[in-house]
Image (cartoon, rainbow, N blue to C red):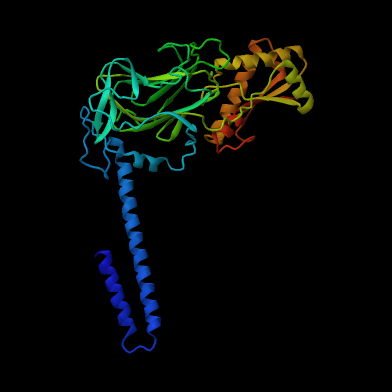
Amino acid sequence: MNKKSVLSAAMVAALMMAGTGSADAQFFKKLKEKVKNKVEQKIDNMVDRAVNGAVDGAVDGAGDGVTGAVKGKKSSGDGYDAAEVEEADAVNNVGNVKNDFVRGSVVVFEDAVSGEQVGEFPSKWDLERGNAEIAVVNGKQVIEFAKDDSWIKPLISKNPLNYFGDEFTVEFDLLYTEGGFEIDFMHPESQRDLEIFTLHWYDAAGLDLNYVKGGEESNYDKGGNSACEQKTKLNNGRWHHYAISFNKRVIKVYVDGVRYINAPNAKAGAGWMTFFFRGDKPAYLKNVVIARGAGELYQRNATDLSEGAIEKAIAETGKFVTNNILFETGKADLKAESMEEIKKVAAYMKKNPSARFEVQGHTDSQGTDKTNDALSQKRAEAVVAALASLGVDDFNLKPVGKGSRVPVADNSTADGRAQNRRVEFIKR
């Protein structure tokens, strides 16, 4: 029964209730409107439930590259069955706490890829190596990277090798089934392939970020690395939206609205960039936006652990705290960059050999208390062992794991969790 027939039936019912010869026509007129509104509301609710069911079905089926809501749309490129699923992806990511990307306020380059000549090189780009041309996928123009080896860069007339600044964002949509993709960010004085940082993925799921750390004199010594495993395959013949944010020292990388990489200690100085693809089948690019500016930079609790600062902290508070003793994720293995901080602590303790300390390990609230308690204890023990290896008398050090029980910031945010992952040295 359609909406119109249901309404008609309801109206007939109302008239039958009214009878004939009623002395209060106004009453039945109001009753008729009320019944009509109730029926319309019920029909609308039924429609909403049907639509929601269809959307849920589309999202559930999107993993294979075909949604229930969009059928029969074939790619013109190498046999891709790449349904337009951006809206379904957006539904998946609503309310995700890691979706904190903010586009820069000044757009310096934008290419939605439209109005181009199919088969020609894209007019807003320049070629570094290989070949690329305009193709059509699902009825929309895109940039097709040729097989084997293609390398392009944005065609920017003003400051072509220095348009980023210390705050910028890059966004794009990418579709591919195999091969490797790479985005390289060069210093204004660097040639291609000598990157200050690079993001690349050469398999189905993993993303790797290699970058020069802050404080390095070189623009090429990429000692920093941040890698992740995607929950969703990236080479599944579907469009995925990528976003990169750089703010003074922080590189963040997002896929489909979810942040997967957050490197807080990168070196500034990128000036220009390239897109690179290599594979046996072509890849497709669209909706590229480069903008200056980025989301607000949080301030790391980078405690000054100079000898004077440690003595001052002990005198004033009886303890000193650092967020710069870092561990491998979910492990008690110290990262190499932590030793600089530990050496400063060791220098103070050897200068004060009679001072005794409780070395406390603290985690964020990710995981269970049982897991975090054990992990924080092992991390505290790892710090004590590192200090002992530098000549500190471990008799004066007591490792204690506090887990996530003593937070100093909000564990519901990434920045808060970063502050909660810390080591405290409490004088006993």
Q: Nearer the viewer, residue 45 or 115?
A: 115
Q: Nearer the viewer, residue 404 or 81?
A: 81
Q: Is residue 231 above or below residue 337?
A: below
How many numbered discs sit on the rendered protein? 0
Residue 165 relative to residue 44: left or right: right
| Residue 367 in view of the camera | yes
Q: Which quadrant is home to the N terminus?
A: bottom left
> Which residue lies at the image location 24% right of the left edge and 22% below the top edge?
281
Quarter residue 419 falls in: top right
Question: Given the current orientation, which residue lies at the most extreme front position?
Answer: 158
Residue 311 relative to residue 76: left or right: right
Q: Is residue 391 above or below residue 181?
A: above
> Which residue lies at the image location 62% right of the left edge and 25% below the top edge?
323
**Residue 42 in picture, x, y percent from top left:** 35, 64
Q: Nearer the viewer, residue 318 or 164?
A: 164
**Residue 9 in picture, x, y percent from top left:** 27, 73
**Residue 212 in picture, x, y percent from top left:** 51, 15
Q: Nearer the viewer, residue 308 or 394?
A: 308
| Residue 202 in view of the camera | no
Quarter residue 332 falls in: top right
Quarter residue 406 falls in: top right
> Which residue lies at the image location 27% right of the left edge and 67% below the top edge?
4
Residue 414 relative to residue 12: left or right: right
> Which residue lies at the image location 65% right of the left edge and 10% below the top edge?
390
Residue 174 relative to residue 188: left or right: left
Q: Which quadrant is home to the C terminus?
A: top right
**Residue 10 in picture, x, y percent from top left:** 30, 73
